[in-house]
Image (cartoon, rainbow, N blue to C red):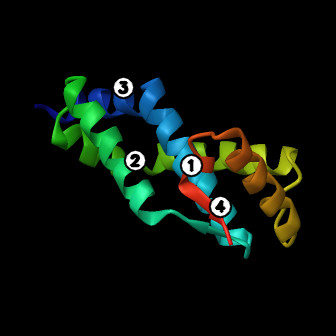
Amino acid sequence: MTAGLQAAAAQSLAQDPTVRQGFYAIGLADEIRKNCPSITPRLVRAYTFLKSLESYALQSGYTQDDIEALKDNDAARSQLEAEIVADLVARGATPGNPAGYCQVGREEMARGTAAGKLLKGN
């Protein structure tokens, strides 16, 4: 596969709604667990979820090279991180305010969202 086709496939994978929502959930859960001392990650569940996204991508016709290219796509990662930070700020989770992150984490867990399923309260 040429570099141009690889880039197109990686961009398509980065824009796939299932993959994008999955990475959003993982990123949101990660930010919450890093900033809220009373919430911890469910590491086995997170690993299983990540592997399910990989399986989904492969079953959807993407290749292992496409998946690797997405992992190395700094622009897509930065864009997703910015969206997560904006969402957290809008919900009251700001740097230096652990209570805000904890509140968002408790909301995610209570709603049973994909991010909430990757977290547990202590």
Specify the label residue 12 is tagged with. 3
Q: Distance between the residues labelled 2 and 4?
A: 17 Å
Q: Quadrant of residue 57?
A: top left
State the mark number for residue 67. Answer: none
Circle 2 sits in a helix, a strand or a loop, which is it? helix
Q: Pointers 3 and 1 in contact (CB under 8 A)?
A: no
Q: Report how far apart the C-alphas of labels 3 and 1 lie in the structure.
A: 27 Å
Instruction: Give the number of the mark in front: 1 or 2.
Output: 1
Return the residue nearer the eye: 82 or 46.
Answer: 46
- Assign a secondary structure to mark 1: helix
Mark 1: amino acid: Lys
Q: Mark 2 points at which residue?
A: 49
Residue for point 50% across, 62% down: 42
Dot 1 and dot 2 residues touching (CB under 8 Å): yes
The residue sitting at 21% across, 32% down in the picture is 58
Using the image, tell me which numbered label, if any, was put on residue 117: 1
Q: Distance between the residues labelled 4 and 1?
A: 14 Å
Mark nearer the N terminus (3 vs 4): 3
Whether 22 is drawn above or below 119: the answer is above
Of the numbered discs in the image, which one, if any, rests on residue 31?
Answer: 4
User: What type is the residue that disc 3 sits on?
Assistant: Ser
Q: Is mark 3 on a helix, strand or loop?
A: helix
**Where residue 87 sits in the image (x, y, percent)?**
76, 43
The span from disc 3 to disc 4 (Cα, nearest Å) is 25 Å
